[in-house]
Structure formats: C-alpha cells, structure tokens
Amino acid sequence: MLRNENFIPFNGSGFGGILRDNEGEVLCAFTGSDSSSFVFQQKLLAVLRGIQLAQKLGVKRIEIASDSLRVIRTINQQEESPWDCMDQIMEISELADRFD
C-alpha cells in the first residue's frame, strides 16, 4: 500500500509517502520537494514517486491511498485532470499498468 502526504512550507513545497506490505509493515518511506505550490500536483508527485519506488523494489501489486479523493478519482479517470497535471497522470497510469 502506498500512502502519501504533502506539506507546503514558506520556501517551497514537499511531499512524501510510505510503502507498506500486505501485513502493514513499512517497506520504506520517502520525501521529496518541488517548486510547485499547487497541493494537487504535490499529491500526484507523491503517488508518482511512490509507484516508481515500488517498481524498483520489485513490488508486484500496489494499492494507492491518499487523503485526497480528487487525486484518486483523477488517477482512476473518474474526474478530469487539471491541464498542467496531465503529464503526471499519464505517467502514473503507464506505471500502474505494469503492476498486477
């Protein structure tokens, strides 16, 4: 399971997440930063980095959790993505297709 979080300090913005196995044990945690102050974009970056990391760790199945229903709905193509986030959504979709 991938759980993501984000934060926006005064001098930039950041994101992070936790990868857990099916028992709930932590496999790893990660953080990152970006120049965007758009919270939606930060949440997408957390999902993208988490999926990339899960792939590198050899994870076969993935479940994504977020505190943003809009992010989940957008990833599942139930809601339209803001135009400036479409590249991230496409990359997330392409990577997610590689999992079982």
Image: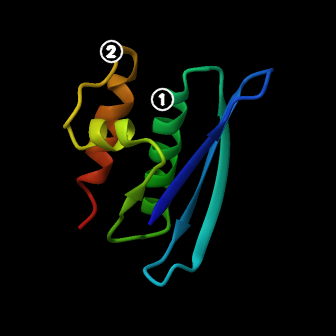
Real-space Cα distance between discs 2 and 1?
12 Å
Secondary structure under badge 2? helix
Question: Which residue is painted at 39% across and 23% down in the image?
Answer: 85
| Image quadrant where one finds the C terminus | bottom left
Above or below, 72 relative to 87? below
Residue 3: x and y in percent read 51, 57
Of the numbered discs 2 and 1, the one sitting upstream in the chain is 1
Figure quadrant of the N terminus: bottom left
In the image, what residue type sits under mark 2? Answer: Trp
What residue do we see at 32% from left, 24% from top? 86
> Farthest residue in the left direction?
78
Specify the quadrant of the image occupied by residue 36.
top right
- Amino acid under disc 1: Phe
**Tag of residue 83:** 2
Q: Position of residue 13 (x, y in %)?
A: 69, 28
Marking on residue 40: 1
Q: Quadrant of residue 15?
A: top right
Q: Residue at x 29, y 35 (%)?
A: 74
Tell me the crowding category of disc 1: few under 14, some 14 to 19, or many 20 or more residues within 10 angstroms, Cα based.
Answer: some
Residue 20 spot, x, y in % from top left: 52, 71
| Residue 99 drawn above or below residue 11 | below
Q: Is residue 68 left or right of residue 61?
A: right
User: Disc 2 vs disc 1: Cβ atoms closer than 8 Å?
Assistant: no
Left or right: 44 with respect to 39?
left
